[in-house]
Image (spheres, grey):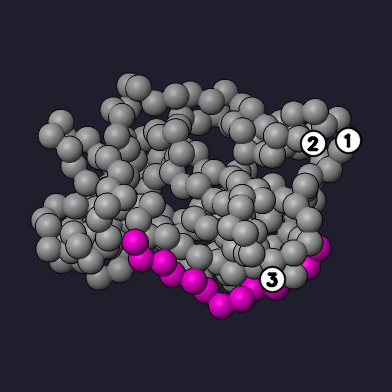
Amino acid sequence: MQIQCAQVFRVCGIASFVVFCVLYGSYQYYYNYYGYYGYGDSQSSNDIDSEPGLPDLVPDAYVIQVSAYLDTQPMSKLQCALSENCLARSAWNADLNDKRKLLRFALKTENRGKGEFNPELPRQYWVWHSCHQHYHSMDAFSYYDLLDKGTGGQAAEGHKPSWCLENTGCGYTSRRPVQYNCHWGTQGISSGCWDTYTSDLDCQWIDVTDVKPGFYVMEL
């Protein structure tokens, strides 16, 4: 499994230092016999480069590093995020005036494979979330863990529901990218293109309210 680590990033108020690490294996997909995607934990990015028609999703650690910042929000503004399990467990017992400390960051995920990446489930099976007024095409697009640098134990976690998979940008590609759009048609990421979740979006964070000062590694 390939691991990409950005340079040490200082986060005041939570940890002395946070090292951002991206595990490519978590984003590796392959087709099974039924035409759906499945996780390919045993395959690295290099292992499948020669296999035709497969997507290969690679997150950009540098974008995470340069966009990360601490934000404090009252629970009264986080009710939608709470309903989608985007806060730590202690938030369920918090009052509306209580505040949560959030480590926000942007996430840019590029499809460097030769095939399109699409949600596993057909559109008619997507789940409608009335609070945010959008469909979720996947249970989760990515998971974020804050790990204790010394012990490797989990100090905090977060996830990003897949509510808008589309091409927000494309590099050079030999063919015209599919026009994915999260508001109509279907969702996905074309080969040679990327999808970016900006740091101001709900759930694009790790709730670090209960995290003590120390040394941590962010694993994605």
Q: From which residue to which does the magenta span run?
A: 1-13
**Label 3 CA crowd tier, 10 Å (few <14, some 14–19, many 20+):** some
Q: Is residue 18 left or right of residue 108?
A: right
Q: Is residue 27 left or right of residue 159?
A: left
Q: Is residue 8 magenta?
A: yes
Residue at label 2? 75
Q: Residue at x 69, y 63 (%)?
A: 69
Q: Does any portion of residue 190 appear in the rendered image?
A: no
Q: Does any portion of residue 64 appear in the rendered image?
A: yes
- Residue 196, given in percent of the width and then of the height, sits at 46, 56
Query: What's under tag 1, amino acid-wise?
Result: Asn
Quarter of the image holding residue 49?
bottom left
Q: How far apart are the alpha carbons under marks 3 and 1?
A: 29 Å
Tag in front: 2 or 3: 3
Q: Marks 1 and 2: in contact by CB < 8 Å?
A: yes
- Residue 17, given in percent of the width and then of the height, sits at 69, 71
Quarter of the image holding residue 64?
bottom right
Query: What's under tag 3, amino acid-wise?
Result: Phe
Q: Please, is residue 164 above or below residue 121 in the view?
A: below
Which circle's residue, 2 or 1, is located before the other in the chain?
A: 2
Residue at label 1? 97
Residue at label 3? 17
Q: Residue at x 77, y 48 (%)?
A: 209
Q: Residue at x 33, y 21 (%)?
A: 124
Query: What's under tag 2, amino acid-wise?
Result: Met
The number of discs equals: 3
